[in-house]
Image (tube, rainbow, N blue to C red):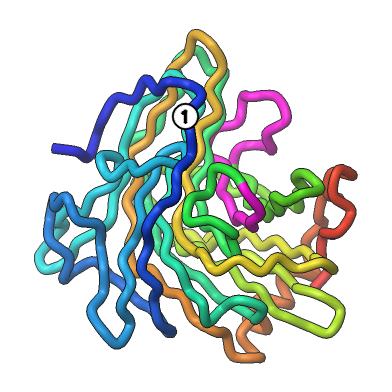
Amino acid sequence: MRHYLRAFLAAGLVLSPLPISAASLPYFDNFDDDPVESSSPPSEPGPESGSFLETINGQPGSAYWNVFAGSSPNRYYQTGFTTASTVNLSAALEFPGLVGGSFAVSTQFAFDTLFDINATGGLTVGLGAAAESAHFSSGARYELSYVLLSIEPGLEPVGTLRIEEFGSDGRAVATSNQIVPVPDVAYTLTFWGTRTSAGLVLKGELLASNGALAVVSAFDDTPLGGAHFGYSVNAEVPTFTNVGINAKFDDFLVTVPEPSTPKFFVAGLLLLTFVRPATRNPSITPGNG
């Protein structure tokens, strides 16, 4: 069983090229036709094509991802681990058709295990977009993340939904209101990027099955142009602590959004106050809807 593994990872991993097959649009995978507990990552046949590349700290890491059976015929994509070191897990696909354009990425997730021994770590789960490489441990990319644990200095409060840009200028952040994470609650996470003549409008939404809603918006006047999109799970762990999670994902969708798609939550943006980004990268600014 690979669904709950213990990771004590060596530092200083050397990154190597990672093979990945391109996917077509629109792409949808509910994992119901993927083999359970297989050594092969989830994939879709033509015309969508494409298969997930599973990594840990930039290296192949299929042991930390697997498809499991829920109530028949439903299956879900899961990652589970405990770790005493900082970990970046990703599962991504390449979409050449999204380079330089608008995008929409959506998924459902839930967690039934979450812990932080010594209460000094941090943990996020979310989506990566427009990344220059197939792993989300380094390189230019956007991430929409939900903060599940936040004790590590510099990490936003628990329950915050945040948009981050990682690039040559550093890291910039825009944050939302807070939704307290609740085990076994289903969440829908959606990340939009809309190209305009001035740049890229970034918007994220987290909708819980209990009705809680968080929305965040940002603008980047120097948009990234990567082709990789997928899942990102990050654990920030200082010395003498352990952090763990058991997260389940379903209904992964990547497409080119209709021009009217963001209007569904524009009204909500007007009700929120956004935190200004770090000055390390002035090219991304929080939006006001």
> In the rendered image of this protein, does residue 207 appear above or below residue 24?
above
Q: Nearer the viewer, residue 89 or 109?
A: 89
Q: Farthest left residue?
A: 72
Query: Which contiguous range is marked in magenta?
Result: 139-158
Mark 1 neighbour class, 10 Å CA radius: few under 14, some 14 to 19, many 20 or more: few
Q: Is residue 205 visible?
A: no
Q: Position of residue 73 (x, y in %)?
A: 11, 68
**Taking 254 as reference, is 273 left or right?**
right
Compare residues 118 and 94 and report the one nearer the observer: 94
Residue that appears at 53% across and 49% down = 136
| Secondary structure under the numbered disc 1 in the rendered image | loop
- Residue picked out by circle 1: 13
Does residue 61 show up? yes
Residue displayed at 83% across by 49% down: 277
Image coordinates for residue 113, horizontal then vertical, percent: 34, 35
The stretch drawn in magenta includes residue 5: no
Quadrant including the N terminus: top left
